[in-house]
Image: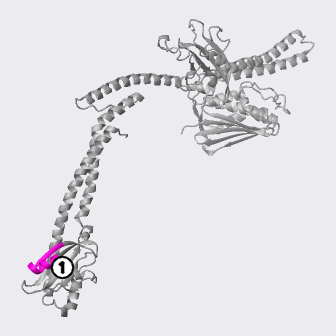
Amino acid sequence: MRFGRFFWKLFLGNAALLVLVLVTCVYFILAEFQQLHEDELATYLRTRAQSIRPETRGKFDPVFQAELSDIARTKGTTPTEGIRITFLAPDGSVLADSTDDETDLVEMASMPEVREALRKGWGESRRWSITNEQELRCVAIRVGSDSEPEGVILLSVAVQRAYSRPESAAKLAWTIVIITTVASVSLALGLAVLWTRRISWLTRAARQIARGDLSRRVIARGSDEIAELARALNEMRGSLSTQLETIDRHRRMLELLLGQLHEGVLVARPDGRIALINPEARRMLNIAESVDLNTSGNSLMVEQCVRVHELQKMLLLPTPETPPGSELGGNGKDKEISLSRSSFEEARLELSAPNGRTSVLARAEDIILEYPDSVEKGRWGRQDGVGRLLVLTDITELTKMIEMKTDFVANASHELRTPLSAIRAAVETLLSLDLKETPEFANRFLEVIDRHSVRLEELVGDLLDLSRLESEESSFKPSTIRVTSALRELRDRWVSALEEKGLQWRTNVAEDCEKVEVNFHLLQMVLDNLVSNAAKFTASGGYISVNWKREDNAIAVEVEDNGCGIPPKEQQRVFERFYQVARDRAGGMSATARRRGTGLGLAIVRHAVNAMGGSVSLQSEVDKGTRVCVRIPQPR
């Protein structure tokens, strides 16, 4: 928190006044305490001297000097307490002392407390010791009567040591001084903060409102001018907050709608800068999320973000002298543009994307960003507030579907025309022949008709199967089947083709796959097409293997052969309709097996597996064989 001059004036003035009052009070308290301490110290020394006096009666004579010295050293205190005991004769001479320091013993006779003790029984004084350079508190007590004094017992202690003891009240007093000083400064600080808080609140509130932060209200208590100002600020904050919440709600709704659009939306200002762009447009145009395009202060030009020249022309406004679409316009010149012109443009483009080429339908038209009366002249380089709206629609899938449909129609027409043409030619030839004279030619053309009619029947059957699989109305409910029975029926259907080519038939069923939940018709369709391909493209003496096993919550069916295999570059395309591997994979086979397939077998397999909610994968190596794995989910 940053404090101003008003706060420091209040704080320093109150703190100085409180500290001055506290120091003065403590000074007088310490002076009084010092006097009380000295009186208590004198009383203590006097009591101590009186306790020693009985032991020294009749011994103040040089004869008993050694005994007096023992008493002085015995009754003397430790150096930490510092009480010195001295025994004096009535004439002031020293008979014994508790210390070995004799530097100031010659001055004992002239001490006022000694003279006073000889005169009225006891005496005390406070004096400065030049020898020890410290202030002493001294108490003397007389031994003997007034008329016949035996001697004087003198006790002295350094006054400074009394203050330096841990239990000294002076230390406590100074501790109280420090504590009360801190408390006083804190009190002064609290008062200053309390008095300036309302002004600080108003200042911070005004600055927050200026920055656009309207989250905090000002506490308005009382009825003075500051309270009225606080209420006025709160009213202004509430009004601004309501307006900003409405604007922010509309902005968030617009961002949410733009973010959920599958079309890219991009808006350019009249000066050629980006005004708005949604995430889908960023993705299509490969604009990084770190590039800030929606802030008016940092918005970039169209040419800096959009690299496609056709889109630049659609986004930038043309000048009145230039027809729309002929040259790049919108260079910031202050010229009038009429919205009555035909501003709509449409184009189909191919854009580069990280995952390949993307087909995009781009549509652009003029929009009014600001009403002409509300736009400041020269703010965006124009006065009419006309911008450009560009909508990008990803039509990649639609383009692929159209291409697939076109290819399908062309392939289907070609595949149907070939057997029909052969049949038609054979029939015309038969009609022109004399069957009685050339019966052998008749049999040959009848075989052609039979072969092509069978191919035509297979092709129509596959097309019908594929149509049923793609129909949304078709429903394929699963049922419980026995795998061994299904495999036995499968082998019976293909036993002729297997024996004709001498192919080995292998099956392997895991123990937990004896019963499965699948649609029998779809399963039969998948297995027939896979076994048919394996039989066609496996040379004599090869094998076909059908394996069943369980993987997690699915059944995996693998159909494997050791035939000619599929090149890697064509393995993904074999599931397309009418696609057939260019390489001749039927060499060495019989005439029946060398018949070309319809090109729909694996496409039917893929759609049938999808109808059962499963997946299909293919692994193949040229001249080594092919393995197709179908995974069908099973109930837990």
Relative to 589, residue 371 above or below = above
Q: Residue at x 49, y 14 (%)?
A: 375
Left or right position of 93 against 522: left
Q: Residue at x 84, y 31 (%)?
A: 590
Relative to 167, residue 304 above or below = above
**Residue 86, quarter of the rendered image:** bottom left
Relative to 301, residue 491 above or below = below
Instruction: Say whether residue 633 is magenta.
Output: no
From the image, which quarter does the N terminus lie in?
A: top left
Magenta span of residues: 109-125
Closer to the camera, 68 or 127? 127
How far from the left and from the top, in percent, is residue 504? 77, 40
**Residue 576, quarter of the rendered image:** top right
Q: Residue at x 60, y 7 (%)?
A: 342
How far from the left and from the top, in percent, is residue 395? 63, 20
What's the residue type where badge 1 is placed?
Ser
Residue most toward the bottom?
Answer: 63
Left or right position of 514 against 61: right
Magenta residues: mostly which secondary structure?
helix
